[in-house]
Amino acid sequence: MDHAAVLALYDRDMREGARPDGPGARVERHHTVVRQVGPPHGWNGVVWSDLDETTADAAIAEQVRYFAGLGREFEWKLYGHDLPVDLGKRLRAAGLRPRPEETLMVAEVADLPLDADVPDGIRLLPVTDAAGVDLVADVHEKAFGTDGTRLRHQLLTQLTGDRDDMVAVVALAGDEPVSAARLELVPGTRFAGLWGGGTVPGWRGRGVYRALVAHRAEVAADRGYRYVQVDATAQSRPILARLGFEPLTTTTPYVSA
């Protein structure tokens, strides 16, 4: 993989050319910043910027004022290659708080093993209704220890919209949800995103996460996407690397207070 070329393509397609991530969201291009304003319970934040030492502080202050005026918390998604090189320090000085760093990893769908076996005792259930969304949120809360309310609203909104750009799946052991994940398909780009992959503690290390990656990559291949990408945690990065994903850069969410 030509890392520099793929990263440049990712920046152009997925960040500078960002599309709304669901019904009711809008993307705004304001001078040197691209931001999303989400619906209630949706995601708000900055996805791309073109800044330097002379423009960064003013642009940060402008976004803080803008989202504060809307009464919204927001996230500035900082990538490791973004400029200026001290942009993270400037975001912290403006009152934004960094969350744990992740790694942007990308693979060509054609290079991935799409025939990963589903572990014995596990069946994969497509999410098509509110009951399935509840299962996803339940896994999310147990796997990550965080509130799944926003995720529940997001998935319900996407399922009831007229777009066909999200696929969610739950892994069940009997009737118990033990892992869940979703695939975000971005029309007009070459990238499909793997999001929300999480497995409850008692089922980690048994191949469930790997099976969900293969399932979603197969869907992306069927839809004609060339690449799949994921913001990988330290826990999932070794699994993804073994499957053929390659790191391109880091990404750190900076969130408003």
Image (cartoon, rainbow, N blue to C red):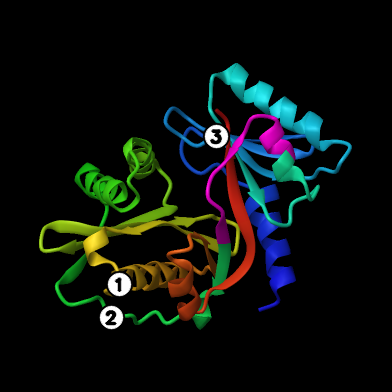
Most distant residue in the left direction? 174
Name the amino acid, label 1: Gly
Mark 1 nearby-residue class (10 Å; few <14, some 14–19, many ≥20): few
Q: In the image, is residue 122 above or below residue 35?
A: below
Name the front one of labels 2 and 1: 1
Q: Name the residue under label 2.
A: 117
* Residue 49 shows up from this direction: no
Magenta run includes residue 97: yes
The numbered dot on residue 44 is 3
Please indicate, yes or no, whether residue 50 appears anywhere in the rendered image.
yes
Label 3: state its secondary structure.
loop
Span colored in magenta: 90-103
Q: State the image coordinates of residue 163 (x, y, percent, origin top left).
A: 43, 47
**Horizontal placement of 193 versus 199: left or right?**
right
Residue at position x 79%, y 50% in the image? 85
User: Separation of disc 3 and disc 2 at Cα?
Assistant: 37 Å
Of residue 174 and residue 220, the one placed in the foreground of this image is: 174
